[in-house]
Amino acid sequence: MAGPVARLARLVVPVACPGCGLTDVRWCDACEAAWWEPPLRCESGAPRLDALAPVLPVWSITELDGPAHGIVAAWKDEGRRDLGRLLRPAMRRGAREVAAALGPAGASSRVAVAPCPARAAHTRRRGEDLPLMLAGAAAAGLVDAGVPAAPVTALAPATGASRGSGDRGRWRAGPSLARPVAWREPAPRPVLLVDDVLTTGATLARAAAALAGSRLVPIGALVLASAPGPGKVLRVRDGRSEPALG
């Protein structure tokens, strides 16, 4: 039972696990566990990625359902900036585990880690550039694995539709615009795209299309969570994709 101090603190600043609602904890052990599983290969469940040739490999830290959905929603839209202390290390660890799966391109030169950008209004409301934060964590994870990497601001938000306007609106809005930094690269450079969630893949497909013709060459993408898709779920273990257990 919570003591009087804890009860008073909950009245002033209520805190609960956004995954299951357990009170008096920022997140519980059970809801945290999914963020420490090996990353998933998830592009097969994202139909918009079929527009890319070759298919872009995409990994996610976990599936976007149940407690994970609640955690991501609270972090993005409910002001729970404290959840960055859970999600940032999870992204870093995920990038470290997928580093070997990026193949020779990821080991041959310094990898650019490019976030799919949030609209300026969203960043102002949230008080932090969340996609850039994820890109920084992913770059640190690659460096942990011995892959030189750094976050880059290579994409601007799409101008025709908000990323919150739904898949069809984002798809019709056209590609994001590559910023000049993408065109000043002296030589082709591999890029790992980073986003918060993957549903149909429209955002990642547009991001990859925006970089076509530049010297930044997408070699994969990493997201926090992906909508469950059809087919076998593959997790990365020791740089190899294996069927998930359970």
Image (cartoon, grey):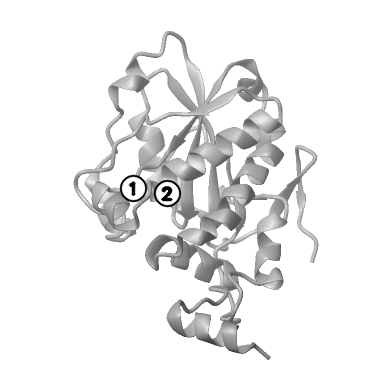
Q: Residue at x 26, y 47 (%)?
A: 120
Of callouts 2 and 1, the N-terminal one: 1
Q: Is residue 165 left or right of residue 29?
A: left
Residue 233 appears in the figure: no
Q: Residue at x 50, y 44 (%)?
A: 134
Verify CB contact (< 8 Å) between mark 2 and mark 1: yes
Give the residue furthest to the top. 186
**Is 59 rendered above or below residue 239?**
below
Q: Amino acid at mark 1?
A: Ala
Q: Is disc 1 surrounded by few (<14), some (14 to 19) or many (20+) residues within 10 Å?
A: many
Q: Is residue 18 left or right of residue 128?
A: right
**In which quarter of the view is residue 149 placed?**
top right
Residue 95 appears in the figure: yes
Who is closer to the viewer here, 89 or 208?
A: 89
**In which quarter of the view is residue 1 placed?**
bottom right
**Which residue in the protein does label 1 denote?**
118
Who is closer to the viewer here, 48 or 25?
A: 25
Residue 73 percent location from the top left of the image:
45, 66
Q: Amino acid at mark 2?
A: Leu
